[in-house]
Amino acid sequence: MVSYGPVATRKGSGEFMSSEEKLPSEDRRRETKTAIDRLLEERQEVLVCYEQVAGIQPFNDNNKNPELLQKFSQLLMDYIAAGHFGLYQRITEGSERRRRVLEVAEKIYPSIAQTTEKALDFNDVYDKADKSAPFEAVSDRLSDLGEVLAHRIELEDKLITAMMQKKGGGN
């Protein structure tokens, strides 16, 4: 089960504590690993579909596949959401306590946010139910998005590495 943020429960004295406070470190690590695994699964699906979409050359009125492009756009949004709700929200809500993870996140998050915006822009254009997307520019936009995704993956891998390290810096 992926946790999408802390859940408040009552302490004996009437105070509240978050789910992060009451979870032993072993359980927090398990939740982190589950969130990372989900992100990596979503990433793999996006990359496989990206290859399929990029393989349609050239995109034009005779050679377009709006359904595949829509599928890719949806998978792209699922992948972005898995990162946001699975990893980044944990950090932005203050649930992550390890200094190394917080340092990495602080360094990379502005770039992650930029890649998110570019993915959302792509989705806004190509996830249209009316199939009115401008197919003449899709090859260039896919190429640009491929570079954005490659950069995002590099950044995510840095964060994942920091999150998977045990106390003391070793694996």
Image: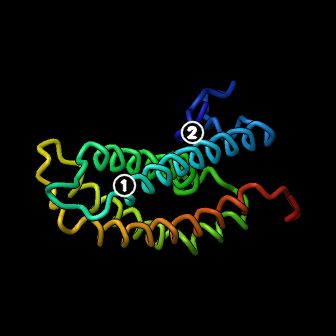
Distance from disc 1 to disc 2, alpha carbons, whole Å, reads: 38 Å
35 relative position to 62: left or right: right
Relative to 107, say whether 26 is above or below: above
Identity of the residue drawn at 68% across and 45% down: 32
Give the x, y percent position of residue 141: 30, 69
Between 92 and 36, the one lying in front of the other is 36
Identity of the residue drawn at 45% across and 56% down: 51
Relative to 14, say whether 96 is above or below: below
Q: Identity of the amino acid at label 2?
A: Pro
Residue 137's label in the rendered image is: none
Label 1: how many Cα within 10 Å (few below 14, some 14–19, many 20+): many
Residue 53's label in the rendered image is: 1
Give the x, y percent position of residue 146: 43, 67
> Splitting the image into 4 quarters, where does residue 154 fall?
bottom right
Kindly identify which residue carries mark 2.
6
Between 92 and 143, the one lying in front of the other is 143
Identity of the residue drawn at 24% across and 61% down: 59
59 relative position to 71: left or right: left
Between disc 1 and disc 2, whose residue precedes? 2
Q: Are marks 1 and 2 in contact (CB under 8 Å)?
A: no
Give the x, y percent position of residue 57: 31, 63
